[in-house]
Image (spheres, helix red, strand yellow):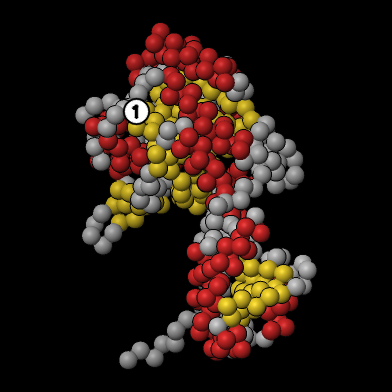
């Protein structure tokens, strides 16, 4: 028998993991409110919901994101199960949705298939404002069409969702990186250009030049900015079909009055992207120092190459994007949206004595069926204490159910504004509640 004493657990030992946090009360409702509004926008535009597992097979992401991407090479939370499976906590939503599209036989459905989703995603990166290791995204995906109007529809539903949440001063940065035909020529030109200046590159870009040249355009290091400004642009290398596709996307944005800017350096950096790529910028965002610092709150693009990367025998033209909900909630422009589950209490329920406690649930159930939200303190006993809480709750009515009322099968209903009260028989409570509901409208 071991004589070793168990280690004393400290607060630090059980603290939430770095970059992950608890969400409660008003903040929880803010997230829930945004989800409901974005889901409403999605539903009215013809999207249907999907929820993919938080754990996916690692190959879903390693085969689709591309060598040289930070998400694949540095940021994935991976694990090996006791059964030997290699799994990963999902770092993004698009690859998982495409996996579901293929696995669930959605190719047989009328095309395109339009899906939306919401949930937590995970990346092992340095936590900072607007960038967490557990973060929440709301995503829109359209699978099964190459048409440019699908690209515009994704951008439209995302900007609408942001505007409904108060993020109105936005700019859509948009670019086209071509398809697999014209992009190969562009990557060759880009690589040749940077090879001439390899000694001037930051260490990360020297590695990107070998593994993923498109990521060179995504570099934020000051040492690389002048080189980036003089580099070949993807638009210059577009074939006629890609150029026409991009022209149509821009025409849709202009017709819808969506503010946009063509950003020649925008590439998004993941191997599966083709043609349209975009980011939506909150121009009113404020950094940790209180200074205005525009922040990307949503992004996406077309990913016509993803299906084959996941083993499909056929290409599946598709486009989608995700909204960084944490960044939306943190924005000074954010307008909290009350979720449907949040109801201000109309009645405060007070009970006194064992007999009353026993019958309390029947009264609360009558109120629930009548759709009258309540507040209560079933664990408390004193009348004065419960009345004080009732006053602070702001509920316009209080129902008092004491020992006498329990024996008489009655309740006392008190109007908290006029202080008037009346006694109601339990048998008449449904009718009284119906009358009360009409009065509270």
Dot 1 crowding, Cα within 10 Å, few <14, some 14–19, many 20+: some
- For image coordinates 57% across by 49% down, the residue present is 33
- Compared to residue 86, the image places residue 71 above or below, namely above
**Residue extending farthest right:** 418
Give the percent coordinates (x, y) of residue 235. 49, 14
371 or 304: which is nearer to us? 371
Q: Closest to the observer: 80 or 360?
A: 360
At x 39% / y 91%, what residue is drawn? 3
Q: Quadrant of the N terminus?
A: bottom left
Residue furthest to the left in view is 313
Q: Residue at x 41, y 28 (%)?
A: 319
Task: Name the residue that disc number 1 marks.
Answer: 112
Label total for image: 1
Where does residue 265 sit, x and y in percent of width and height?
Answer: 54, 23
Q: Secondary structure at mark 1?
A: loop
> Which residue is outermost to the top?
240
Considering depth in this image, is 23 or 219 the residue closer to the camera?
23
Q: Is any atom of residue 26 visible in this view?
A: no
Q: Is residue 238 above or below residue 265?
A: above
Q: Position of residue 360 (x, y in %)?
A: 53, 79
Indicate the position of residue 229 as horizontal and vertical percent values: 59, 19
Quadrant where the C terminus sits is bottom right
Q: Nearer the viewer, residue 305 or 52?
A: 52
Residue at the spot 65% in from the left edge and 39% down from the top edge = 166
Q: Is residue 275 visible?
A: yes
Instruction: Locate residue 123 relative to residue 417 in the image: left or right.
Output: left
């Amino acid at each position: 028998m071991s004589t070793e004493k168990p280690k004393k657990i400290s607060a630090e030992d059980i603290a939430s993991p770095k970059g992950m946090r608890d969400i409660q009360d008003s903040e929880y409702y803010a997230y829930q409110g945004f989800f409901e509004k974005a889901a409403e926008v999605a539903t009215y535009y013809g999207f249907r919901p999907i929820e993919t597992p938080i754990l996916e097979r690692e190959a879903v992401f390693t085969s689709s994101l591309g060598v040289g991407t930070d998400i694949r090479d540095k940021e994935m939370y991976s694990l090996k199960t006791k059964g030997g499976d290699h799994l990963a906590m999902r770092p993004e939503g698009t690859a998982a949705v495409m996996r579901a599209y293929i696995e669930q036989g959605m190719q047989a459905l009328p095309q395109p298939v339009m899906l939306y989703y919401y949930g937590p995603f995970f990346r092992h990166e340095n936590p900072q404002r607007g960038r967490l290791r557990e973060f929440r995204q709301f995503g829109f995906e359209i699978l099964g069409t190459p048409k440019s109007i699908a690209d515009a529809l994704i951008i439209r539903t995302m900007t609408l969702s942001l505007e409904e949440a108060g993020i109105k001063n936005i700019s859509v940065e948009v670019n086209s990186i071509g398809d697999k035909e014209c992009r190969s020529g562009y990557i060759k030109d880009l690589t040749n250009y940077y090879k001439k200046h390899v000694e001037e590159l930051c260490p990360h870009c020297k590695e990107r030049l070998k593994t993923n040249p498109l990521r060179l355009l995504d570099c934020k290091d000051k040492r690389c900015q002048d080189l980036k400004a003089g580099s070949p642009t993807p638009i210059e290398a577009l074939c006629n079909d890609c150029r026409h596709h991009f022209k149509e996307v821009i025409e849709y944005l202009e017709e819808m009055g969506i503010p946009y800017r063509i950003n020649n350096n925008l590439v998004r950096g993941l191997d599966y992207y083709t043609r349209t790529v975009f980011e939506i910028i909150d121009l009113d965002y404020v950094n940790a120092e209180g200074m205005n610092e525009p922040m990307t709150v949503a992004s996406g693009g077309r990913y016509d190459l993803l299906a084959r990367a996941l083993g499909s025998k056929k290409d599946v033209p598709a486009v989608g994007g995700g909204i960084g909900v944490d960044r939306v909630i943190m924005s000074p422009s954010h307008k909290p949206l009350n979720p449907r589950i949040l109801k201000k209490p109309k009645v405060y329920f007070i009970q006194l004595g064992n007999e009353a406690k026993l019958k309390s649930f029947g009264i609360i159930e009558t109120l629930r069926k009548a759709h009258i939200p309540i507040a209560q303190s079933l664990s408390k006993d004193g009348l004065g204490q419960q009345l004080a809480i009732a006053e602070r709750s702001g509920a316009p009515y209080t129902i008092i159910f004491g020992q006498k009322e329990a024996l008489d099968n009655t309740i006392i209903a008190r109007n908290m504004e006029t202080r008037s009260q009346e006694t109601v028989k339990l048998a008449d409570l449904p009718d009284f509640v119906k009358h009360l509901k009409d009065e509270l409208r």
